[in-house]
Amino acid sequence: MTLAGKRILLIIAGGIAAYKSLDLIRRLRERGASVRPIMTRGAQEFITPLAVGALAASHVYIDLFSREDEQDVGHIRLARECDLIVVAPATADLMAKMAHGLADDLASTVLLASDRPILIAPAMNPKMWQKPATQRNRQTLERDGVHFIGPMEGEMAESGERGLGRMAEPLDIATHVEGMLAGPKPLVGLKAVVTSGPTHEPIDPVRYIANRSSGKQGHAIAAALARLGAEVTLVSGPVTLPDPAGLNVVHVERAEEMRDAVLATLPADIAVMVAAVADWRVITSAGQKIKKQPGEAPPPLQLAENPDILKTIGHHELRPRLVVGFAAETEHVEENGKAKLQRKGADLIVANDVSPETGIMGGDRNRVRLITHAGIEAWPDLSKDEVAERLALWIATQVGGSNA
Ligand code: C5P
């Protein structure tokens, strides 16, 4: 009963994924939460208030101008009398309203009136999700501190199209809610440093060597540690993700800058090195753009090895109590992970198979194995957010401070 006593206001908007909200209600309630549902007009085209009300064991709020609903609690109280607002599914339309502060029905009015944390699980056709307008709204909402889970990659229920747009699974949403609300914050008073994203190694002022890391996993881990109360510094390479709220973000480009930024955070209690740091930098890096000379051979690129940040931290005199590394491998994942644990002086290596067919690099899901000196634990295929949530909880069991 990890959510015992927690009050969730669940806003169901109109999309085919609304059928999953019925399961979400059960998942939240079996964890001890009470669920008060609001349905938009669109939602009622997909599932009935009767089903929602029965599963939630609650009145279902529908109408902004219903005298009955307003006398019962009223939209302002609805907006405030909860620990968390979950919008699932969140349609492109509702996201747009939220981003612009519109309030023309009960759901949007409550969202505008509320001062509670908000978690939204978007679900829409992939083309709608990719549209610049929707992406602008997502960015605005993220900047406003709205938490997102998904959308996930997969097949669309109505059209059979594949792409980003599926609503996150109810179990993943429930886990995320736990992460946001679950009782004590076991990492309060502890300092964590997390690296994320790729590094860019300049060839000249306009060209660089990079890799396909998106930063999604590292950013999610930093945010999850912060939710458990840790004081987090996220050292991020160049990514297109917004800075997660509630933590200190240092932006760097090159591996050497990343190392300096990480070392500057010491002493720290926890280090989680997720970044895909370039192994080499270009020592012939030019101050001016290298010109193509007709008839001349291409310029040679001379590489030097970059500092290994994880290894440096793992053997540092100010070594954090818990040092976690990642191993992006395409073969012999476990063997390489174990060797890495030794070599880098880490307590845990999170090994994942990044062969192109897994779609993990840059994707939204991850399947990891936890390799420690005690053994190996295989986790199922999870969203990167859920991997982050679970990893943060795992870390808390290892170093849990006084509040654990
Ligand atoms: O040796 P490999 O690159 O496979 O090790 C991966 C792990 O080491 C990751 O945790 C990564 O963040 C870290 N690493 C690092 N600095 C490097 C190379 C890797 O911190 N130069």
Image (cartoon, rainbow, N blue to C red):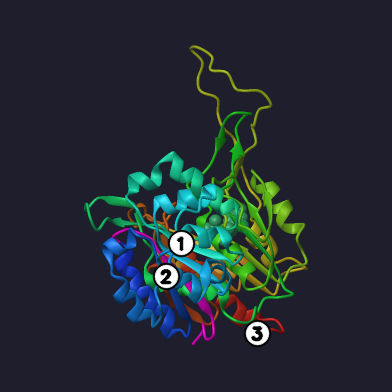
Q: Is the magenta stretch mostly helix, strand or loop?
A: loop
Residue bearing mark 3 = 404
Along the line of sight, the residue nearer the viewer: 203 or 399: 399
Residue 272: in magenta span: no
Q: Which of marks 1 and 2 is nearer the N terminus?
A: 2
Q: Where is residue 389 in the image (x, y as percent from the top left)?
A: 52, 71
Mark 2 burial class by Cα count in 10 Å: few <14, some 14-19, many 20+: many
The answer to whether the residues at label 2 and label 3 have Cβ atoms under 8 Å apart is no
Q: Can residue 303 be seen in this view?
A: no
Q: Ligand 1 sits in which quadrant?
A: bottom right
Q: Distance between the residues labelled 1 and 2?
A: 8 Å
Residue marked by disc 2: 61
Question: Is the CB of the residue bearing disc 3 within 8 angstroms of ligand 1?
Answer: no
Q: In which quarter of the image is residue 293?
A: top right
| Amino acid type of the residue tagged 1 in the rendering | Leu
The amino acid beneath tag 2 is Tyr
Horizontally, is 128 left or right of 280 in the view? left
- Which quadrant of the rendered structure holds the C terminus? bottom right
Marks 1 and 3 sit apart, C-alpha to C-alpha, by 39 Å
Left or right: 260, with 284 as reference point: right
115 vs 57, left or right, is right
Across and down, in percent, residue 43 comes to 33, 62
Residue count near mark 3 (Cα–Cα under 10 Å), binned few <14, some 14–19, many ≥20: few
- CA separation, marks 2 and 3? 38 Å
Q: Give the range drawn in magenta.
A: 1-16
Q: Name the residue under label 1.
A: 106
Indicate the secondary structure of the residue bearing disc 3: loop
Question: Circles 1 and 2: CB distance less than 8 Å?
Answer: yes
Q: Residue at x 32, y 69 (%)?
A: 20
Is residue 400 something that shows in the picture? yes
Give coordinates of residue 75: x percent, y percent: 52, 67
Q: Earlier in the sequence, mark 2 or mark 3?
A: 2
